[in-house]
Amino acid sequence: METASYLLFSILDAIAMVVLMIKSYRQPLAAYKWNILYVCVGVACWSYVVRVVIGLSPYIDIFGQFLIFAAFFRYSLKIRLVYSGLMVAVGYAAYVCIQFPIYFAVTALGVSDVVAQNTGGNGVIAIQFFTDTASLMVGWLISLFNYGFTFIVIPPHDLSRKEKLFTGTNGMLAVSTLAAAAIITTSLYLTVHYDAALYAYPLVLLILGTLYFLSRRRESEDDRIFITKNGAIHKKVRS
């Protein structure tokens, strides 16, 4: 029963994160529904094996999830590497930013479980449930109000062209993506070992804000190119 519960909520966690990843960059969610389900099941199984079966550190679990999601966008959906990493970083950071206030609320009610360290318990399940629900609602609101960035074209991308990973805005996005992985892992470390979630939360907000700012900048660059080529003064619209 505990195994089924762990896997079920891990799949829901992964789905909620992927929804944030995809909706933040206006990608067609329904078109990839089966691919998403498969990768989310894979991520849940990875997490279960790492944390429960082998008993390794949760840091290894999170790092592995980053790699699995990035590989999914790069090789399954055929999205360029720098954008794959960006989508994973933004979705993961947004999920953690949603999770922290819920963690604070649940622990304030007297639940002593540390969500990042434990693999079960009512406190952990409550945090997962409310975080997943809130994340899916955020994804729905992004879609409802046509928010999100449009500079990542709908895949498949031309992967035969060499990517400029560390030049211009793309370079800053790539570096910030790596920083996001490091900061999210650091926030987990602070929460688990020092019960310092209140200090870890601003770090995640900072990196999410940085990724948002750079995405806005990349969007503006894309708009300028579009206007120059088409002589238009209106912003392009993603269908």
Image (cartoon, rainbow, N blue to C red):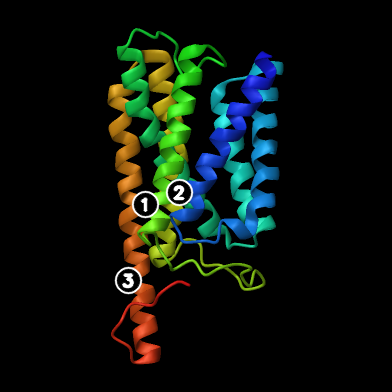
The amino acid type found where label 1 is placed reads: Leu
For numbered disc 1, what is the local secondary structure?
Answer: helix
The amino acid type found where label 3 is placed reads: Ser
Query: Does 64 sit left or right of 105 as displayed?
Result: right
- Category of crowding for the residue at label 2, using alpha-carbon neighbours closer than 10 angstroms: few (below 14), some (14–19), many (at least 20): many
Relative to 147, say whether 98 is above or below.
Answer: above
Relative to 150, say whether 122 is above or below.
Answer: above
Q: Residue at x 70, y 44 (%)?
A: 38
The residue tagged 2 is: 177
Q: Which mark is residue 27?
A: none
For numbered disc 3, what is the local secondary structure?
Answer: helix
Q: How many marks?
A: 3
The residue tagged 3 is: 220
The numbered mark, 3 or 1, whose residue comes first in the sequence reads: 1
Decide if residue 54 is in sight here: no
Residues at badges 2 and 1 in contact (C-beta under 8 Å)? yes
For numbered disc 2, what is the local secondary structure?
Answer: helix
Question: Residue 175 versus residue 106: which sits nearer the camera?
Answer: 106
Q: Residue at x 36, y 17 (%)?
A: 106
Residue 50 placement: quadrant: top right
The residue positioned farthest toward the bottom in the image shown: 231
Residue 238 is situated, as x and y percent measured from the top left of the image, at: 45, 71
Q: CA distance from mark 2 to mark 3?
A: 19 Å
The amino acid type found where label 2 is placed reads: Thr
Residue 211 is situated, as x and y percent measured from the top left of the image, at: 36, 52
Residue 130 is situated, as x and y percent measured from the top left of the image, at: 43, 28
Query: Does 90 sit left or right of 75 as displayed?
Result: left
- Category of crowding for the residue at label 3, using alpha-carbon neighbours closer than 10 angstroms: few (below 14), some (14–19), many (at least 20): some
Q: Which mark is residue 211?
A: 1
Q: CA distance from mark 3 to mark 1?
A: 14 Å
Q: Residue at x 37, y 22 (%)?
A: 103
